[in-house]
Image (cartoon, rainbow, N blue to C red):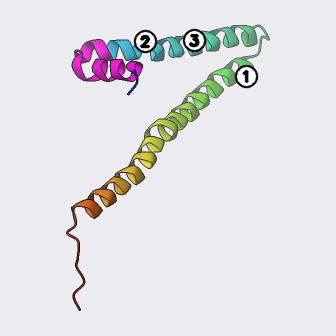
Amino acid sequence: MGEEQEQKFHQLTEEPVSRVISHLAVPCIISMLVTAFYNMADTFFVGMLRSNAATGAVGVVFSMMAVIQAVGFFFGHVTMGQMLSLPLLIAGLAVLWAKLRPSRSRSA
């Protein structure tokens, strides 16, 4: 492993859970704040059109965007990790089985 990977491994396995969670949560919080500020700015400028329908549409589309983003995160992060780890696990078990299996001698 590289030095950076060893440092991250140490951080995730040795440091207190509260410190790790707070350290990993900061980028998520910043991302959510940027999205919220974008939505507020969008609502402000659309609200200058003096149309209740346009302002309502911004709220509806933001909610739809949040749901689509959540589905994308689920399939992008959770499922892909599982889809990649399962074949690796099966391949590893097959190699282990091949090494531990007693060799069969052919008798005539």
Q: Position of residue 8 (x, y in %)?
A: 35, 20
* Residue 20 in which image quadrant: top left
According to the picture, the residue beneath numbered tag 1 turns out to be: 53
Gap between marks 1 and 3 measured at Cα? 25 Å
What residue is drawn where x is 21% and y is 61%? Answer: 100
Q: 73 or 65: which is nearer to us? A: 73
Vertically, is 57 above or below 82? above
Q: 42 or 94: which is nearer to us? A: 94
What residue is drawn where x is 52% and y is 38%? Answer: 76
Going from N to C along the chain, the mark reached first, 2 or 1, is 2
According to the picture, the residue beneath numbered tag 2 turns out to be: 26
Going from N to C along the chain, the mark reached first, 1 or 3, is 3
According to the picture, the residue beneath numbered tag 3 turns out to be: 34
Q: Amino acid at mark 1?
A: Ala
Q: Which span of residues is magenta-colored?
A: 3-20
* Residue 106 in which image quadrant: bottom left
Dot 3: element:
helix
Q: Quadrant of the C terminus?
A: bottom left
What residue is drawn where x is 58% and y is 16%? Answer: 35
Q: Position of residue 22 (x, y in %)?
A: 34, 12
Gap between marks 2 and 1 measured at Cα? 35 Å
Dot 2: element:
helix
Q: 64 or 88: which is nearer to us? A: 88
Q: Is residue 41 magenta?
A: no
* Left or right, 87 with reference to 54: left
Q: 87 or 24: which is nearer to us? A: 87
Q: Is residue 13 magenta?
A: yes
* Left or right, 2 with reference to 107: right
| Magenta stretch prevailing secondary structure | helix
